[in-house]
């Protein structure tokens, strides 16, 4: 009975399937089939190398650009700092080029390959470069440049405001005045131009505690938004009313100097004073410690920027 049906099967039936499976192109294909005959699902494996590049690459770029724009290289050789920033931008553009090529060739399905990660690294690297340049330049302007300027200027350890004139201390960065020197708040004044620019002259009290009027006031303590409209409540800095403080750090920001000069001119006119060549300074108790604060603030800004950007990059990668 069975032989009758077997005789009806065409000769060579099934040979095509056997030959097809024996073909070299199908080598290993059966290994990928499950018990049901359907392909097994492969688990997507995270590419640790790509993730590490995505996490640390833009962060290291930010640190390098931030440091180049913040510290001594920017001060001693601005061209070198901008050269590093330019080379870093070329690196970012190279990443963008690979991202475009990957888009044109299609996106791979596995995480860590293809256009998705190229685009991610390119965009975050571009963001890191922009943040590094911007915040590095701000850190340099606010903290490190005044520190380097004061370091390169001269130090005058015994300035007598009753005898010395501003022309004699043109190269002064740090000044220590004679004992009993103090701010004469009677002649404090202010000038408003969006901000309140406050000034108060440096005088010297007598042994009996009185503060005589000087023939010339060439040394002025300054501050911003630390006095009222007429300057009578001058309270700029932590040592403005400290009788033991008698030192100053030179004002280094050229953009502020014209407004402080206008405030001095108002004080000269209001109180009939004389100032031949006014020098503007920040009144402090310890000039060395006050100068070091600029440097410390610069490095604190770097550490804060490193931590903040790493946290941002970690959140983006996650």
Image (cartoon, grey):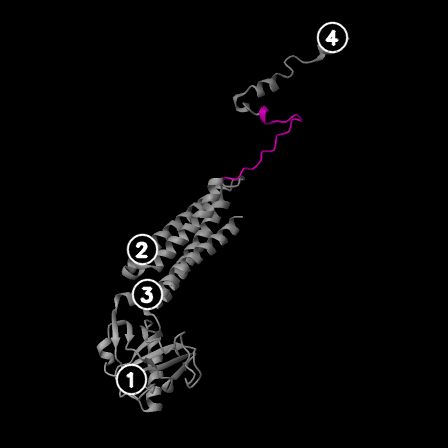
- In three-dimensional space, the C-alpha distance between marks 2 and 1, rounded to whole angstroms, equals 46 Å
- In three-dimensional space, the C-alpha distance between marks 4 and 2, rounded to whole angstroms, equals 89 Å
Q: For the residues carrying marks 4 and 2, which lies nearer the camera in this image?
A: 2
Magenta stretch in the rendered image: 30-47
* N-term mark: 1 or 3: 3
- The quadrant of the rendering that contains the N terminus is top right
| Residue tagged 4 | 3
- In three-dimensional space, the C-alpha distance between marks 1 and 3, rounded to whole angstroms, equals 26 Å
- Residue at horizontal 35%, vertical 87%? 267
Magenta residue check for 261: no
| Residue tagged 2 | 83
Q: For the residues carrying marks 3 and 4, which lies nearer the camera in this image?
A: 3
275, above or below 86, in the image: below
| Residue tagged 1 | 217
* N-term mark: 2 or 1: 2
Query: How many other residues sit within 10 Å of disc 1, few (<14), some (14-19) or many (≥20)?
Result: many
Residue 9 picture location, percent across and down: 69, 13
* N-term mark: 4 or 2: 4
Secondary structure mainly formed by the magenta segment: loop
Query: How many other residues sit within 10 Å of disc 4, few (<14), some (14-19) or many (≥20)?
Result: few
Q: SS at mark 3?
A: helix
* N-term mark: 3 or 4: 4
91, above or below 171, in the image: above
Query: Front-most of 237 and 300?
Result: 237
Residue 193 picture location, percent across and down: 41, 80
Q: SS at mark 4?
A: helix
Residue 136 falls left or right of residue 33: left
Q: For the residues carrying marks 3 and 2, which lies nearer the camera in this image?
A: 3
Residue 295 picture location, percent across and down: 35, 62
Residue 145 falls left or right of residue 112: left
| Residue tagged 3 | 147
């Amino acid at each position: 009975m069975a032989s009758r049906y077997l005789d009806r099967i065409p000769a060579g039936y099934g040979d095509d399937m056997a030959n097809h499976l024996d073909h070299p192109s199908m080598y290993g294909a059966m290994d990928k089939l499950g018990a049901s005959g359907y392909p097994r699902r492969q688990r997507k494996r995270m590419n640790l190398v790509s993730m590490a590049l995505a996490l640390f690459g833009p962060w290291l770029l930010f640190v390098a650009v931030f440091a180049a724009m913040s510290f001594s290289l920017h001060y001693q050789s601005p061209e070198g700092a901008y050269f590093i920033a330019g080379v870093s931008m070329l690196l970012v553009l190279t990443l963008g080029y690979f991202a475009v090529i990957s888009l044109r060739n299609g996106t791979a399905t596995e995480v860590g390959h293809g256009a998705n990660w190229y685009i991610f690294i390119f965009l975050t690297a571009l963001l890191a470069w922009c943040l590094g340049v911007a915040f590095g330049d701000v850190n340099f302007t606010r903290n490190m440049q005044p520190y380097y300027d004061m370091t390169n200027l001269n130090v005058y350890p015994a300035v007598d405001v009753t005898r010395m004139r501003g022309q004699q201390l043109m190269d002064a960065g740090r000044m220590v005045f004679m004992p009993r020197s103090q701010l004469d708040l009677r002649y404090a004044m202010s000038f408003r131009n969006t901000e309140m620019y406050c000034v108060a002259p440096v005088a010297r009290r007598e042994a009996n505690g009185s503060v005589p009027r000087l023939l010339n006031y060439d040394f002025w303590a300054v501050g911003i938004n630390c006095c009222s409209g007429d300057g009578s409540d001058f309270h700029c800095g932590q040592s403005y009313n400290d009788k033991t403080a008698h030192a100053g750090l030179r004002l280094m920001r050229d953009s502020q100097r014209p407004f402080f000069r206008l405030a001095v001119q108002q004080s000269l006119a209001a109180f009939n004073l004389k100032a031949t060549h006014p020098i503007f300074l920040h009144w402090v108790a310890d000039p060395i410690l006050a100068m070091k604060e600029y440097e410390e603030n610069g490095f604190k800004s770097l550490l804060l920027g490193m931590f903040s950007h790493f946290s941002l990059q970690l959140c983006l990668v996650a």
